[in-house]
Image: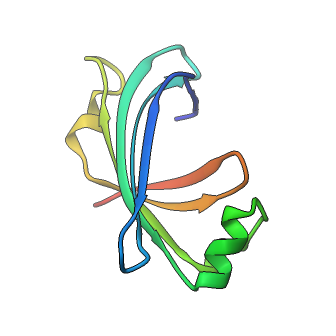
Amino acid sequence: MCGEVVSGGSDWQYRRPDGVTVVRAKYLLKTDDGTLIQLENDGFRHGPSDVLDRISAGEAVDPSLYYFRTSPRFFPPEGRYQWLGCSIFVASAARFDTTVELVVFQMA
């Protein structure tokens, strides 16, 4: 499945006292065939302070230098993508200056 995020979602982040950033995002994904799928994605990002500071400054940082994992939940309409709403997914994420890239895995 391929798609793109539709403009207008929401994204909350806060840093806990222990330095872990908690991420919560809600948005729509538009598949390459035009189907709109609601998505909620919660996760955690943490790592060495100097690495997180570089990310905050907009520097491209190798994702292996920090931990950023999420658990996306899909809310598809009935039909072709209905299976997305019946499975558990985890994602490995990478934070860049203006984007976040996810590689999503379906748990067997």
Nearer the observer, 22 or 26: 22
Q: Quadrant of residue 74?
A: top left
Query: Residue drawn 79% across and 65% down?
Result: 59
Q: Is residue 20 left or right of residue 48?
A: left
Query: Residue drawn 29% across and 18% down?
Result: 77
Query: Residue drawn 70% across and 45% down?
Result: 98
Q: Position of residue 11 (x, y in %)?
A: 45, 40
Q: Is residue 55 left or right of residue 106?
A: right
Q: Position of residue 27 (x, y in %)?
A: 43, 30
Could you tell me which quadrant the C terminus lies in?
A: bottom left
Q: Quadrant of residue 62?
A: bottom right
Q: Is residue 61 left or right of residue 15?
A: right
Nearer the observer, 61 or 15: 15
Q: Is residue 30 placed above or below 51 in the rendered structure?
A: above
Task: In the displayed orientation, state which residue is furthest to the top.
Answer: 34
Q: Is residue 49 left or right of residue 80?
A: right
Q: How is the image coloured?
A: rainbow
Q: Is residue 45 placed above or below 49 in the rendered structure?
A: above
Query: Residue drawn 57% across and 30% down?
Result: 3
Q: Position of residue 55 (x, y in %)?
A: 68, 66
Task: In the displayed orientation, state which residue is furthest to the left.
Answer: 86
